[in-house]
Amino acid sequence: MKPPAFLYHDPRSIDEAVALLARLDNARLLAGGQSLMPMLNMRYVLPDHIIDLNRIEALAGVRQIGETLRIGAMTRQRDIAEHPLVRSRLPLMVEALGHVGHRQTRNRGTIGGSLCHLDPAAELVAVAANLDATIEIVGPKGARLLPMAEFALGFMTPAIAPDEMVAAVNLPLPAARHGYAFLEMARRHGDFAIVAVAVVLTLDPAGRIATCAITLGGAAAVPRRMAEAETMLRGAAPDALLFGRAAATARAVDALEDAQVPGWYRRQVAETLIERALATAHRRAVAANGMAS
Amino acid sequence: MSDGGCASRSIAVTVNGSVCRAEAPVRLTLSDFLRQTLHLTGTHLGCEHGVCGACTVLVDGRAMRSCLMLAVQADGHQVTTIEGLAAPDGSLHPLQAAFCRHHGLQCGFCTPGLLTTLVEFLKDCPDPTAAEIREAISGNICRCTGYDSIVAATIEAARALRGDGTTP
């Protein structure tokens, strides 16, 4: 249970890190280390080089650019949850972060690390998918932007080349008056989600649903946007029956199966959580708009 | 800096207020650095893959799992271990005293991690509910107490730290 031998590099700038990535064979980037360090300790990975990103100050921080929140890849989960801009404009993120690991792992874990590890059950991955995030990737040829839907290529596989790294994530902010909910089912607090659901919705002046995004985490290899349910809800007058019908689309999800959790169980949990999340998000949207419910 | 990389490095870590300088192999975890290089064996190692919480220490005041950090990453930072909680005259930290009174430990293996986690938690949340305490220690596994006595001790310690003066 000790890390294997490797050579250690701790660059101070993004350029330096990219140059190291280009030059070194079999190198791994070390972000918060809350997934890579266990993998090293258990020797699931045997890198020749570790490039530690923790001393690159330019990779951390939260700022608003127009109606987008740009979060640096090395921003700690704890710092995101406590950031005033995130708390005021993106409460979905705060609610989701409450489910991410534990106090000790959120103190060190980063958003970039979570996105690149791309665990199917990771809350931040589901949030990024739900908000149609754009991932900022840097490499030897410069920077490029990739929509989250293309970034999440497959099971734990981000669409980044071996000589590239994630520099930041850009999250389009929902309208100031919106409703949101992040719900998850896990066997113990902080465990991997069996299923997680993220919902953001807005209402038109008549109280009908104007926009709606629903994402399942943990259910499939990559975050699953519930496009059929979203279409069903857009423009409709919200009520419990409609939420139930929208949630029932989860029955068609090709859900992950594992030794503990069969696919049919995940679909059932997903349906229940979507229904609850829609009701909660709607209640919050009504309150945010000062409407009578 | 970005040279050919190194296999070992001279580091300086402030541990419980004293600067400790040592040569550390880069693959040495912070937990092994504390236990084997500095002989601070109060930090316990349970699972060594970030599940049990026994090795939790404070790095720059924040609770972190020392088995999931390299010693070289602590270079230039402040680390507080269980050995740094009591006052220099040996009088216990209010959390330690409350753990004693409420039987918040039996075998004691998880205790260093619980105490360091709770020291940080009570700074952030000085008047917690029992449910908030249970969530705060969700990353610390105790197989003896059933947690009730730990929660009771934490509530009492919080009161003492707030200076309510109502501790027995």
Image (spheres, rainbow, N blue to C red):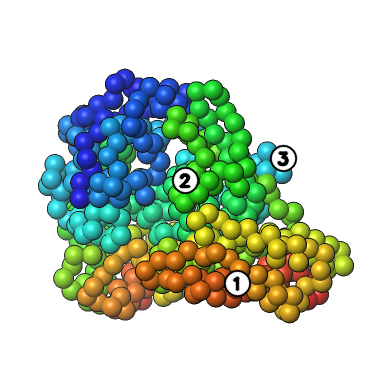
Residue that carries the numbered disc 1 in the rendered image: A251
Above or below, B50 relative to A45: below
Task: Quadrant for the C terminus of chain A, please.
Answer: bottom right
Above or below, B142 relative to A10: below
Residue B140: horizontal and vertical position, in percent? 31, 64
In the picture as drawn, the residue positioned furthest to the top comes out as B3
Find out whether the residues at labels 2 and 3 contact each other: C-beta distance under 8 Å.
no
Image point (75%, 62%), residue name = A231
Q: Amino acid at mark 1?
A: Arg
Q: In whole angstroms, how far apart are the C-alphas of marks 1 and 3?
A: 38 Å
Residue that carries the numbered disc 3 in the rendered image: A66
- Nearest the camera: B58 or B168? B58
Residue A68: horizontal and vertical position, in percent? 67, 43
Above or below, A174 relative to B129: above
Q: Quadrant of residue A280?
A: bottom right
The chain under label 3 reads: A
Residue A248: horizontal and vertical position, in percent? 65, 74
Label 2: few (<14), some or many (≥20) within 10 Å? some
Q: Is residue A136 visible?
A: yes
Q: Is residue A170 visible?
A: no
Element assignment for label 2? strand
